[in-house]
Amino acid sequence: MFERILIAVDGSEGSKKALRLASKLQQTCGGNLMVLTVFRHHSLLEASMSMVRPDEPESLDDSMRNYAKEVAEDAKAIAAEAGAGNVRAFVKAGQPARTIVKFAEEHEADLIIVGSRGLGDMQGFLLGSVSHKVTSLASIPVMVV
Amino acid sequence: MFERILIAVDGSEGSKKALRLASKLQQTCGGNLMVLTVFRHHSLLEASMSMVRPDEPESLDDSMRNYAKEVAEDAKAIAAEAGAGNVRAFVKAGQPARTIVKFAEEHEADLIIVGSRGLGDMQGFLLGSVSHKVTSLASIPVMVV
């Protein structure tokens, strides 16, 4: 059925619920499960911070990337616990919805799964209304959990 | 995995694509496939027709219902051809997104599948941006195909 499922996670409860469903679906269908966490580049963060300008944007980028890696690794562990096999975790910087859809295309995913209620843009991270944008942009099926 | 899948159809190519995917998923998961076609009540149609007021709203309602029945039965045949078992077709009148979500709740569906690009509100029928409304309203997973 679905051979290459992409699940986007941001560490929120909503995305963990989506992750557990994705894990079950991977078990049912076989194939691969790709776990993706997207973080915003400092340039994008800066643009949204208006008055505030970090002294060292590079270190901000690093800490965002490190947090995103933790979220992705945590998600990989949850997926394994939920019984999923063939799980790989990825971290990408960029605008959430576009980055998810581009990643799905590049990795020939046949299904994208996203949580419906995430952190939104709090902390520069994923989901929330991102799910709407993903369904609009993607040319493959999108499941909103 | 999914025991009670609800697929909303409007006769468009987009919804037929979603229907074929729903049929495959029903085969993979077992369980039931419910095919739902929603048509608008004459009162809702009238509201959208502004200057136009049909002489016999009841007969308009009847022809909308009959067309919806044809679409639902056609969809049921397509699902059976695609290999789905335990398929039942339903027709309901009302506002598309709300009616789909309400039907899903009443029939304890565990997944709603909708096409992403349908007829919109052309002919008073389903889908298009309806998929966005369904993902917003539903408390269960929604797959946009």
Image (cartoon, coloured by chain):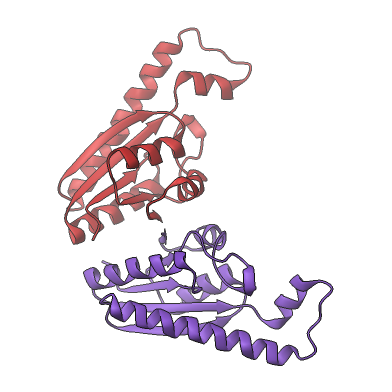
Chain colours: A red, B purple
Question: Taking B48 as reference, is B14 left or right?
Answer: left
- B141 and A104: which is toward the camera: A104
Please, is residue A134 above or below residue A121 in the view?
A: below
Question: Taking B96 as reference, is B6 left or right?
Answer: left
Q: In the orientation shown, which residue stands out farthest toward the top?
A: A55
Residue in the image at 81% along x and 81% along y: B53
- Residue A127 in the image: x percent, y percent? 45, 42
**Residue A60, quarter of picture:** top left
Residue in the image at 47% along x and 73% along y: B9
Q: Dividing the image into 4 quarters, which one contains the N terminus of chain B? A: bottom left
- Residue B22 in the image: x percent, y percent? 34, 69
Question: Taking B22 as reference, is B27 left or right?
Answer: left
Question: Taking B138 as reference, is A3 left or right?
Answer: left
Residue in the image at 50% along x and 18% along y: A43
- Residue B50 in the image: x percent, y percent? 81, 71
- B40 and A123: which is toward the camera: B40
Q: How many marks?
A: 0
Q: In the orientation shown, which residue stands out farthest toward the right?
A: B51
Residue in the image at 56% along x and 74% along y: B99
- Residue A24 in the image: x percent, y percent? 24, 58
Please, is residue B55 above or below residue A130 in the view?
A: below
Q: Dividing the image into 4 quarters, which one contains the C terminus of chain B? A: bottom left
Q: In the orientation shown, which residue stands out farthest toward the front?
A: B13
